[in-house]
Amino acid sequence: MKKIALIVTALLFVGIVFAQEDGTTLDQPELVRKPVEFAWEKMETDTFSVPVPPAYIREADVMYYHTVWRTLDMREKRNHPYYFPTATRGTWKSLAQTIFDAADYKNPDNPNALPIYDDEFCTMKKPLEAVRTALSESRVQYYYNEEGEETGSEQVFDEYGADKILYYRIKELWIFDKQRSVLDVRILTIEPIVEYIKHVNVAEGASLSDEDDAIAGEPGMRSVGFIYWEELRPYLVRQEMYNVKNNAARISYDDALTWKRQFASLVYREQNTYSDREISEYIKNSRDQRIESERINEKIRQFEHELWEF
C-alpha cells in the first residue's frame, strides 16, 4: 500500500513539474466559465447570427439614386457607443475591435477572415502586410555602448490599438424604388481611419530641421482600407453594443448602423460633375463645410418630399 501511495505521489509531482515547464498551467490558465456579467442566463448571440437581408431592388425600378460619402467622428457624443470600450471587457467590444477580430490580419492562414480592400469599389484586396503597416507606427531604435557611441539601430513597429480608430468613412447610396415607392439608403463600404501623432526619427543628440520640426507632433490620418459592408454585416450582427436608452433591449452594431442609423455624421463628398470632389476642395471654412453638408442632406429630403406633394 505504501508503494502504491509513493508511486501516485511521484506521478503527480512529475505532472506538476512538466506543466510548469510547459507554461500552459501557470501562464495560460483555461477559462472556467464565460464572463460573469448578468444575473440571468445570457442568450447566445449566435442565435442572431444571420443579418436581415435588405429588400431586393431591380435595376428597372431605380427611378433615382444619389451617392454620398460621410464621416463618423468617434469623439461625437452620439457615436460614443461605437468607440467604447477601448479595450474588450467581458463580451463587450468596440466597433473597431469587432472589425479587427473579424479581419484577423495577424493570422494570414485564416480562410474565414474578413477581407480588406485597397480601393473603394472593393475590387483589389489589400495585402495583410499593408494592413499591419497602416495599424502601426515605425520608428528607429538606436543602440549605444557604455561610452555613448552609437553601435547600431533597427526599425521597430509600435502597433495601434482599436482606440486609435477615431473616424470612419462610409459610402452610401440613396435610392428611390418605384416598385415599393420608398426612398431607401444602402451602405456600400466602410473605411476605418487611424489618427496618430507624427514624429521624426533622429539619433540621440541630433537636432530636428525646420521642416521636420514643423511635422513632428502634428496629428495625421491614415486609412486602414475599405470593407464591403455586406461582408462585414455577419460579424456586426453577432456583437452587441451598449443601448443608451435601455440596455436590456438587445441591439447589435448591424441594427444600429444598417437599420436604425443611430450615428452622427457629416457629408464630406457627394456624387457630382467634378469627379466627385470633396467639399473641402471648394469650401475651406469648417463652419461653411458643415452648412454645405446639411444642404446636401436637405436636398435628398426635399426630393422625397416633392414626390408626395399634391
Image (cartoon, rainbow, N blue to C red):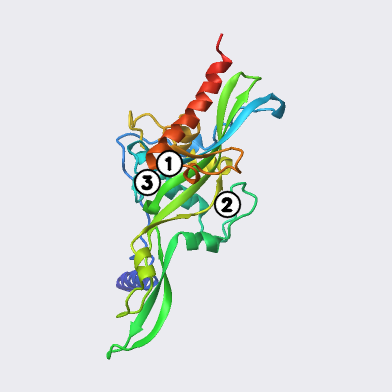
Q: Position of residue 262 (x, y in %)?
A: 42, 32
Residue 72: assigned label: 1
The residue carrying mark 2 is: 115
* Residue 47 in view in this figure: yes
Q: Earlier in the sequence, mark 1 or mark 3?
A: 3
Mark 1 Cα-neighbour bin, 10 Å: few <14, some 14–19, many ≥20: some
Task: Please state which amino acid type lies under the numbered disc 3.
Answer: Lys
Q: Is residue 165 left or right of residue 129?
A: left
In which quadrant of the rendered view does residue 111 lie?
A: bottom right
Residue 31, percent from left and from top: 37, 53
Identify the residue position indicated by label 3 in the image.
34
- Look at the picture and state if 189 lies above or below 195: above
Question: For numbered disc 3, what is the local secondary structure?
Answer: loop
Q: Amino acid at mark 2?
A: Pro
Task: State the CA–CA distance, disc 1 to disc 2.
Answer: 22 Å
User: In x, y percent, where is residue 236?
Assistant: 48, 41
Dot placed on the residue nearer the N-terminal end, 3 or 2: 3
